């Protein structure tokens, strides 16, 4: 029986190729792919010469290679975008700047200086890192370190008025000083309570309890105070005044009171300007020498003025905006 050469090669070539596949590769082919492969093997015309075994094996090898590529397509490589060099440099500069800024914040928080300030008619209290308490009167400022070195003197700087309650501190049996700096003098204590007012080129210290040593900046030596002492130093005249007083009179502002004992109206006017920021004017200069005695509110200016007005028939108090007139 004569057979068509074309039909003879088609099953032989396809069958050989099919047998050369592994079971996994055979299973991966769909019916459509099988038919396509079979058609490709049948593409040869009957007139074509018989296919040699070597050619057949080459065709099989090419088909198997194509099949494996189709079964495992190559993934395109991700394109990596190269950033310009200046971007990396800028990022480095910003990083260093942020690190320096954080370091400065940490240094200030740990070793920096704190400023506590009050406005007119305002008081504030602060507890320092050593446990000492400071109450700041109106229109005042206190500067102090966030913390002190171990064993070093505890130092603060005052402008205005404040009342101090200082905790005793020791290291290796040695007492650690607490020092309040003002323009005219330094107040050195170990553990005590006292009032300091530093205004108008004059410093006034009133000791309530304990002991205080004053170191003047214009004279050598020191002044030792005992409870009930008042020492006032004037920068303008260099005068040093020392007298005995009742300490509560000078720290009554902590309880929102002002206590005057034979205090001149001129001194009271200065107190009003310092605490409330008001301008006080005397229409008659002689009124400034008038003395008043009594307890007045420190937290209500209008009531304070009404009481001053009612304290003497010689005084008429008029408030005109930010100006107070004594007539």
Image (tube, rainbow, N blue to C red):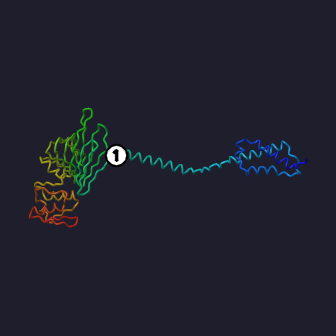
Is the residue marked by circle 1 packed among few (<14), some (14-19), or many (20+) residues within 10 Å? Answer: some
Q: Residue furthest left?
A: 313
Q: Quarter of the image containing the C terminus?
A: bottom left
x, y (%) of residue 247?
14, 48
Q: Give percent across and percent down for residue 230.
A: 15, 47
Q: Is residue 285 left or right of residue 9?
A: left
Instruction: Give the percent coordinates (x, y) of residue 74.
Output: 67, 47
Who's the residue at 48% across and 50% down the image?
94
Residue 88, image x, y percentages = 54, 49
Dot 1: what SS? loop
At a point 10% along the width and 60% down the height, the residue shown is: 290
| Depth check, front residue: 154 or 49 | 49
Q: Which residue reaches farthest top?
A: 172
Badge 1 is on which residue?
Answer: 112
Total residue callouts: 1
Vertical placement of residue 77 versus 284, above or below:
above
Quadrant assignment, res 24: top right
Against 64, residue 320 (above or below) is below
Residue 201 versus residue 226: which sits nearer the camera?
226
Quadrant in the rendering for residue 58:
top right
Residue farthest to the front, as pictured: 1
Q: Which quadrant of the structure image shows residue 145? A: top left
> Front-most of 65 and 49?
49
């Amino acid at each position: 029986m004569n057979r068509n050469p074309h039909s003879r090669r088609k099953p032989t070539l396809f069958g050989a190729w099919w047998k050369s596949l592994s079971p996994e590769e055979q299973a991966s082919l769909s019916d459509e792919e099988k038919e396509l492969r079979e058609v490709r093997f049948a593409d040869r015309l009957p007139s074509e010469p018989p296919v040699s075994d070597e050619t057949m094996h080459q065709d099989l090898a090419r088909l198997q290679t194509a099949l494996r590529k189709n079964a495992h397509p190559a993934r395109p490589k991700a394109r990596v975008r190269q950033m310009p060099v200046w971007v990396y440099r800028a990022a480095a500069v910003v990083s260093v700047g942020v690190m320096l800024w954080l370091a400065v914040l940490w240094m200030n928080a740990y070793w920096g200086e704190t400023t506590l300030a009050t406005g007119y008619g305002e008081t504030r209290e602060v507890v320092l890192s050593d446990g000492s308490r400071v109450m700041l009167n109106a229109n005042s400022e206190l500067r102090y370190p966030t913390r002190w070195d171990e064993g070093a003197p505890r130092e603060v700087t005052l402008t205005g008025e404040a009342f101090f309650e200082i905790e005793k501190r020791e290291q290796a049996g040695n007492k650690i000083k607490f020092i309040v700096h003002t323009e005219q003098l330094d107040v050195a204590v170990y553990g005590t309570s006292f009032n300091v007012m530093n205004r108008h080129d004059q410093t006034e210290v009133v000791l309530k309890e304990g002991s205080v040593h004053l170191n003047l900046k214009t004279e050598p030596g020191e002044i030792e105070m005992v409870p009930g002492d008042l020492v006032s130093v004037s920068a303008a005249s260099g005068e040093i005044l020392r007298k005995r007083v009742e300490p509560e009179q000078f720290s009554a502002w902590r309880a929102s009171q002002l206590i005057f004992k034979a205090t001149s109206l001129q001194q009271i006017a200065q107190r009003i300007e310092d605490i409330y920021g008001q301008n006080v004017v005397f229409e008659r200069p002689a009124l400034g020498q008038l003395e008043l005695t009594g307890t007045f509110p420190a937290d209500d200016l209008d009531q304070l003025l009404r009481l001053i007005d009612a304290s003497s028939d010689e005084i008429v108090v008029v408030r005109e905006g930010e100006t107070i007139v004594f007539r």
